[in-house]
Each structure stands twice: as structure tokens, then as C-alpha cells.
Image: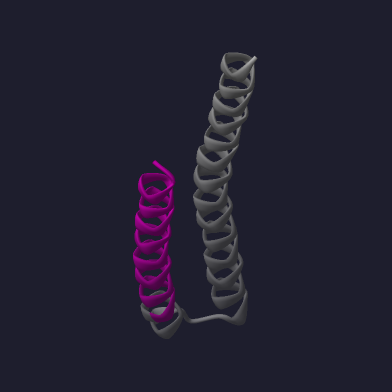
Amino acid sequence: MLGAKIGACRQRFREAEAYIESTQQVARELRRESYTPRERAAISEAEARIIRLEAAQARQVCDQALIKWGRNMRMLEEAQGRSKR
């Protein structure tokens, strides 16, 4: 069960990594085609915002999975403790 949760977290981070790499590539291309420093700065700001959001969402998925796993483990331990009495 823990292996499945860890696998889901790894998959989500791989997806986030691919999305971030894609975002960085697009931002590089847009900056090359931009004419003003203001445009390049706006592109860089948007890129940074997207990357932060994607990373935060990936962490949230893993945090939720681990919280759920921890809760299930506590319930299992409590049930095992009651059954030993």
C-alpha cells in the first residue's frame, strides 16, 4: 500500500517535471522573440509563477496521499490493538 502511494507521488512529480521543462522551453522561445525588456520580464515572471504553482500542486498530491496513508495506518494499529485485548 505504501509502495502504491510512493509510486503515485513519483508519477506526479515526473508529470510536474515534464510540465515545468515544457514551460521553461516555451518561456525561452518567447523571450527570444520579445522586443523589450519589459516583455521579457513579464514572461520570466509568468514562468516562475507557473513553476511554483505546478511544484506546489505536486507536493499537495503527495502530502494528501501520505496523510491518508498515515491515517489508515493509525486506524489499522488501533484495530489491531483492540483485537489483542
Magenta-highlighted stretch: main secondary structure? helix
Say above or below: 80 vs 13.
above
Indicate whether 25 appears above or below 9. Answer: below
Residue name at image x 61 percent, y 66 percent: 45
Q: Is residue 72 above or below residue 17?
A: above
User: How many numbered badges does the structure rendering display?
Assistant: 0
Give whichever of 56, 36 is nearer the camera.
56
- Decide: is 10 above or below 1: below
Q: Which residues are magenta?
A: 1-28
- Residue at 50% of width from left, 39% of height from top? 65
The one of 78 and 66 positioned closer to us in this rendering? 78
Between 85 and 4, the residue placed more toward the observer is: 85
Quadrant for residue 46, please give it: bottom right
- Residue 28 locus on image (x, y percent): 42, 80
Taking the magenta stretch, the answer to whether it contains residue 12 is: yes
Depth check: give the residue in front, 80 or 20.
Answer: 80
Residue 26 percent location from the top left of the image: 36, 72
Q: Position of residue 2 (x, y in %)?
A: 44, 46
Residue at (41, 59) in percent of width and height: 16
Residue drawn at x 57%, y 15% as measured from the top left = 83
Q: Which quarter of the rendered picture does the N terminus lie within? A: top left
Magenta highlight on residue 17: yes
